[in-house]
Image (spheres, coloured by chain):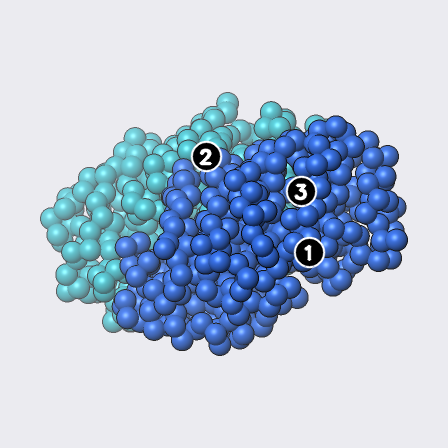
Chain colours: A blue, B cyan
């Protein structure tokens, strides 16, 4: 069983392939793309240890010449300094304009490898092999690449579309549970903002908190439908001018929670889960959404093992103040994405701050 | 008298404005583009000293908030390290997605400011105010931005189109003579590859070796027609897939000469002049061009004060060997752009190396 989703873009379209055992066949998927022979494989030590040999073998068997650059794991290495290491590797491997950088890893590896591909020789080919659920359903699709500035996340970057995204569901078996759950937050997000059918299938599952409890069929559905949602939105709005805003559902308050806790207490997916609970409650307060739908969303979030309440000790006033510094604030108005039914959202900057306060109070830790 | 050349591109077209006293009116030219209020002006100390105050005054008078980042002058500062300084300035000035980076300077400043604009917040607006003739007729148009890697020129970069290129011919009065002449090499190039009328007008001029001997009208013509040629080629081939190759006329051997002399003995324009003389002679040897046309080209090059012979001490074998390492070499074949008449060239990789040797011998220093 495999799915192929085509991301239609004006300049160059590309496929997202969801295929069990995909990692062992990357070379076959890359062959028809008429890329040059040279490949620079970028990964981190843990992921490379799991899948590097398989990927190498597949690329070598299909005639690619592979060199490697292994970067340390973790967001704190997502810096211009790591990019310089990638440039040095690109130079030493004598990459040409027809060469390809392959990212094997989660969002951090994908963002960095993509930025190097965007800026080496003014842009070379790029292939994503995401190994975390979050990267599979979100970061690997959409062409956002980049690194952090010491004073802010993702301030340095470029849009650079991959030539192929290869998703192998089986690599999720080696993913830590907490990271798997973080990815499920984005999956639920697609259900709420775009895909009521996906939402229903998630509701029908008995357990969602670990990949081993999820059937192969459902996992394939989760990956395929999530990628379809993101691909659809990205195709319509490549450079983030309009529709893409709906992907920020749960992220307005989510970002504030992540940032206020120094990116250490909750991870991105957990923050988005809390953010969706908050946005859902705000929508109910504004009579945009029914309390029943909001309850169904909460039940689904809880079934994945994700939080729906603010972390202990977080001050409501600080959350509200942080919202004002979000880069999407325009003319001082905070923009929210709010559900109107399961599968549909609207974007609004007309949320009274009293309502935000009240909702944050309600989901604050007792 | 002013000229406006529109560069037509699929995503976003932009204007090249050639206007005497343009620097004093930059704000007026930027106003209709609906850019954000914040501007980061990037320059080097020498150029900023000449024109910074004028530019500031014009931007302030039209409501822009201007901050500055002054980088040291010279190719050796065209590094990722300088880009980090630009990122810090962008952060300190709190640039937003709607903000603009303005480059006031020659090719080095333009390339760096453009790369920072391409990669800050995944791309912000960019305006070029080129102050060298070379930057006016070449570097500022076409969207190439970037910096050098310690082991190679322009290896790091991105395509990022400006929103406006403003050329003020009067700033050429403060340009050192040798730099002015370097720019004239590219002007002659446009005459040979594309614009027989420009070539004829250059031939008709009494002197071309210093801007003060060139009439205001002719200078306006030189700038306008050169920009038109480049804009036309770039519009047809934004990402360097085909036609853009003709812009490399004189650059094949030119690059080898520059590189072998460590970028210190001859500057880029001088190297291109020598390269055009070599390419012209090769074309004559291959019966593609008449000896008379080649003589006319040589006379024009000499009228600008540019060289047509290899620098003393350069070994012919080394030049030939260096040609093989050019990044445009494909399957070991060196690609040449050769004239077939004044105003028309063809691209070929079918030049016998014996002919290259013979021509280099002929233009070698005695």
Kindly report the distance in space between the C-alpha atoms of the residues bearing marks 3 and 2.
43 Å
Report whether mark 3 lies on the same chain as mark 2: no
Residue closest to the far top: B1
Q: Position of residue B68 (x, y in %)?
A: 70, 47
Residue B221 or A355: which is nearer the viewer?
A355
Kindly report the distance in space between the C-alpha atoms of the residues bearing marks 2 and 1.
41 Å
Mark number for residue A258? none
Q: Position of residue A19 (x, y in %)?
A: 39, 58
Question: In the displayed structure, would residue B16 be above or below residue B251?
Answer: above
* Circle 3 residue: A296
Quadrant in which the C terminus of chain B appears: bottom left
Q: Is residue B178 left or right of residue B277?
A: right
On what subunit does the disc labeled 2 rest?
B
Which residue lies at the image location 32% right of the left edge and 46% below the top edge? B241
Q: CB of mark 3 within 8 Å of CB of mark 2? A: no
Mark number for residue B11? 2
* Circle 1 residue: A306
On what subunit does the disc labeled 3 rest?
A
Which residue lies at the image location 12% right of the left edge and 52% below the top edge? B286
């Amino acid at each position: 069983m495999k799915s192929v989703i085509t991301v239609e873009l004006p300049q160059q379209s590309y496929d997202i392939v969801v295929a069990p055992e995909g990692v062992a066949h990357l070379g076959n998927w890359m062959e028809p793309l008429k890329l040059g022979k040279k490949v620079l494989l970028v990964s981190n030590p843990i992921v490379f240890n799991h899948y590097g040999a398989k990927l190498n073998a597949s690329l070598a068997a299909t005639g690619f010449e592979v060199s490697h650059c292994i970067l340390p794991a973790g967001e704190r290495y997502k810096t211009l300094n790591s990019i310089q290491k990638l440039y040095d590797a690109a130079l030493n491997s004598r990459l040409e304009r027809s060469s390809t950088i392959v990212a094997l890893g989660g969002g951090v590896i994908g963002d960095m490898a993509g930025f190097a591909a965007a800026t080496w020789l003014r842009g070379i080919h790029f292939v994503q092999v995401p190994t975390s659920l979050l990267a599979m359903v979100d970061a690997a699709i959409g062409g956002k690449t980049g690194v952090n500035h010491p004073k802010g996340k993702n301030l340095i970057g470029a849009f650079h579309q991959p030539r192929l995204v290869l998703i192998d569901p089986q690599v999720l078996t080696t993913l830590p549970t907490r990271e798997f759950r973080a990815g499920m937050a984005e999956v639920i997000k697609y259900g709420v903002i775009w895909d009521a059918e996906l939402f229903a299938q998630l509701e029908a599952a008995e357990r969602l908190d670990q990949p081993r409890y999820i059937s192969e069929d459902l996992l394939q559905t989760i990956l395929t439908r999530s990628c379809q949602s993101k691909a659809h939105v990205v195709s319509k709005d490549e450079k983030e001018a309009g529709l893409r805003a709906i992907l920020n559902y749960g992220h307005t308050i989510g970002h504030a929670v992540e940032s206020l806790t120094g990116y250490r207490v909750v991870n991105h997916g957990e923050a988005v889960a809390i953010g969706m609970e908050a946005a859902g409650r705000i929508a109910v307060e504004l009579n945009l959404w029914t309390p029943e739908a909001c309850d169904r969303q909460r039940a689904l979030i809880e079934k994945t093992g994700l939080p729906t309440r603010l972390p202990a000790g977080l001050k409501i006033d600080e959350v509200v103040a942080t919202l004002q510094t979000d880069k999407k604030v325009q003319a001082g108005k905070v923009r929210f994405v709010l559900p109107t039914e399961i599968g549909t959202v609207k974007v609004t900057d007309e949320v009274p701050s009293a309502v935000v306060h009240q909702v944050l109070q309600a989901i604050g830790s007792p």
